[in-house]
Image (cartoon, rainbow, N blue to C red):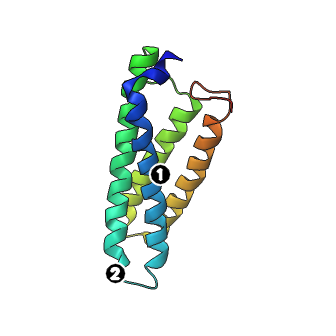
Amino acid sequence: MRHVESIMMYIHPPLAILGYIFIFLSLIFMLLEHRHNATIKFTRVALYLAWFFNLAGLVTGIIWAGIAWGAYWSWDPKETVTLLIFISVCMSVLLYEKRRKISLLLLLCCLLFIVANLLITFGSFSLHGYGL
């Protein structure tokens, strides 16, 4: 468990969690757009921040994996689901202006992936599992 004592422990998880928070905020703002047109600006900002923090979480996780395990990517279930979250957020950002319903659907999928990620973390069948 030497990797838990790394400085990356204080960088990577907060960035990933911020990415998840901004996905949730984007989803809420998108749902409120029908009632209040002013939330469109907030939705855009939240979507861009969700993209940024998910990218930052993914990149810092790759760096931490290289430090801790000597390999940057191992197709571990948590890494794979994190990649699916990032791809879904990218697609949601790209489709937001033209296809808002599809963008909303992608963010809902992200929420399911986030729940799966949390279950993997608290399970014991992954490099990232702590088996709580």
Relative image position of residue 122 (x, y in whole percent): 65, 36
State whether residue 129 is above or below residue 1: below
Which residue, given by chain and number where applicable, does mark 2 sit on? 38
Which image quadrant: the C terminus?
top right
Q: Which residue is drawn at 58% across and 32% down?
A: 77
Q: How crowded is mark 2: few (under 14 residues within 10 Å), some or many (20 or more)?
A: few
Amino acid at the residue labelled 2: Ala
Report whether residue 23 is seen. yes
Assign a secondary structure to mark 2.
loop
Closer-to-camera residue (25/30): 25
**Location of residue 8 with respect to 42 vertically, above or below:** above
Query: Which quadrant of the rendered structure holds the N terminus?
Result: top right
Q: Which amino acid does label 1 sit on?
A: Tyr
For the point 38% across and 54% down, the residue is 50
Q: In this view, does 104 lie above or below 70?
A: below
First along the sequence among labels 2 and 1: 1
What residue is at 49 percent from the left and 23 percent from the top?
A: 4
Query: Label 1, on which residue?
Result: 20
Q: Where's residue 90, x and y in %?
A: 39, 52
